[in-house]
Each structure stands twice: as structure tokens, then as C-alpha cells.
Image (cartoon, coloured by chain):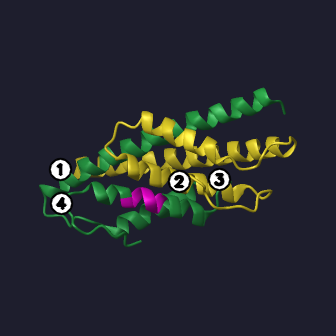
Chain colours: A yellow, B green
């Protein structure tokens, strides 16, 4: 493989990075909307069962190359970041 | 906000989760391709300067709601996962 092809691959990684960034922030905004909606209702703020269901759904669609434990680790960090956005809930620990 | 609207938001989060999953795995495949390409050349296997540049580029495009430190933390976990895919390089620690 030439250096040019290598650069092209690296450019594609940069592109994927920015797409992931955009989706992580989009997810953050949705979490804020959900927490705001829950705030106006009598709904328990943090729902670990929902997080577990989300992780199970993610695993169902995982075709690799990353293994289940790696994907779960990354998504737990994304979920934790979502919890930190929620100023109404002082519990920041993930329960899944 | 009605329970129906809340469910719609949660469905959108599920959808975003799967898009993130797809991109993380797409990134993993690109990292494998890059490492394979580097393997055939006399190029140093792991390049922390490249990782730092990627993080700086990501920060330039970050419009929130997540702050820089949170985005950096999540991406470092994604980068680490990429290192773990590389069977030719025994160094698994991230240097950024």
C-alpha cells in the first residue's frame, strides 16, 4: 500500500471521528430532552433497566470487529456522560 | 410532554446508539486496514502525535452539549479499543 492510500485511510478515520462526535452530541441533546420531559412528570429520574435494555439492543446489532465487552465499555462511558448532563439528578453512577 | 413523546425520544436514542455502534466498528475496520498497511512498510506502529491531532480536530468541531474533557475521555476509550485490535503491536497504552 502506498503512502497516499495510507493517508486516504487516515482521512476516512478523521471523517468517522467527526460523525461519531456529532452523534454523541446528538445523543446528549436527546438525553437532555428526555430528562426535561421526565422532570415535568412523576417519573423516576434514572432508569438502569432502560440502560441495560439499550446495551442488550446494541449487542444484538454488533457485528465486530470490536467484541461485546469493548463495545459495552465504550457505551457505558457514553451513558455516564449523559448522566453528567442531567443537573436534576445528583446520582452520577451508572447502575448497569 | 406525553408518555408517547417520551417514548419517541427514547426510540431516537436507540437509533443514535446503533449509528454510533456502526461508526465505532467502521472505525475499527479502518484501524485494522491502517495497521495492516503499516505492517508492510517501515513505519512506526503506534503514533501518539496522530492521536493528538485527531483529538484536536475533534475538539475544533465540538459544539456541545458535551464539554471538551468529556468528549476527550470518550474518544480516548475509542482509540484504546483500536489499539487492542492491533495484534502486531504489544503496546496497548494510549500516549495522549
* Residue occupied by mark 2: A76
Q: CA distance from mark 3 to mark 2?
A: 10 Å
Q: Residue at x 63, y 41 (%)?
A: A50
Neighbours of disc 2 within 10 Å: few (<14), some (14-19), many (20+): some
Q: Residues within 10 Å of mark 3 (few under 14, many from 20)?
A: many
How busy is the neighbourhood of tag 4: few (under 14 within 10 Å), some, or many (20 plus)?
few
Q: In front here: A41 or A8? A: A41
Question: Which residue was labeled with disc 4?
Answer: B88
Q: Nearer the viewer, mark 3 or mark 2?
A: 2
Q: Is residue A9 magenta?
A: no
Q: Which residues are magenta?
A: B75-80
Q: Are marks 1 and 3 on the same chain?
A: yes
Residue at the disc numbered 3: A82
Mark 1 closeness class: few <14, some 14–19, many ≥20 residues within 10 Å: few
**Front of the two marks 4 and 1:** 4
Dot 4 and dot 1 residues touching (CB under 8 Å): no
Q: Verify whether residue B78 appears in magenta.
A: yes
Between label 1 and label 2, give the one nearer the viewer: 2
For disc 1, the marked residue is A2
* Mark 2 → mark 4, Cα distance in angstroms: 28 Å
Instruction: State which tag comes first along the sequence, 1 or 3.
Output: 1
Q: Which element type, helix, strand or loop, lies under badge 1?
A: loop
Q: A92 left or right of B69?
A: right
| Quarter where residue B7 is shown | top right
Amino acid at each position: 500500500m502506498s503512502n497516499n492510500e495510507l493517508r486516504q485511510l487516515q482521512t476516512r478515520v478523521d471523517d468517522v471521528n467527526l460523525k461519531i462526535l456529532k452523534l454523541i452530541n446528538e445523543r446528549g441533546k436527546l438525553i437532555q430532552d428526555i430528562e426535561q420531559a421526565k422532570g415535568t412528570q412523576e417519573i423516576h429520574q434514572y432508569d438502569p433497566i432502560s440502560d441495560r435494555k439499550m446495551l442488550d439492543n446494541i449487542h444484538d446489532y454488533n457485528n465486530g470487529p470490536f467484541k461485546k465487552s469493548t463495545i459495552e465499555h465504550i457505551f457505558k462511558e457514553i451513558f455516564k456522560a449523559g448522566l453528567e448532563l442531567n443537573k436534576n439528578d445528583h446520582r452520577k453512577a451508572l447502575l448497569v
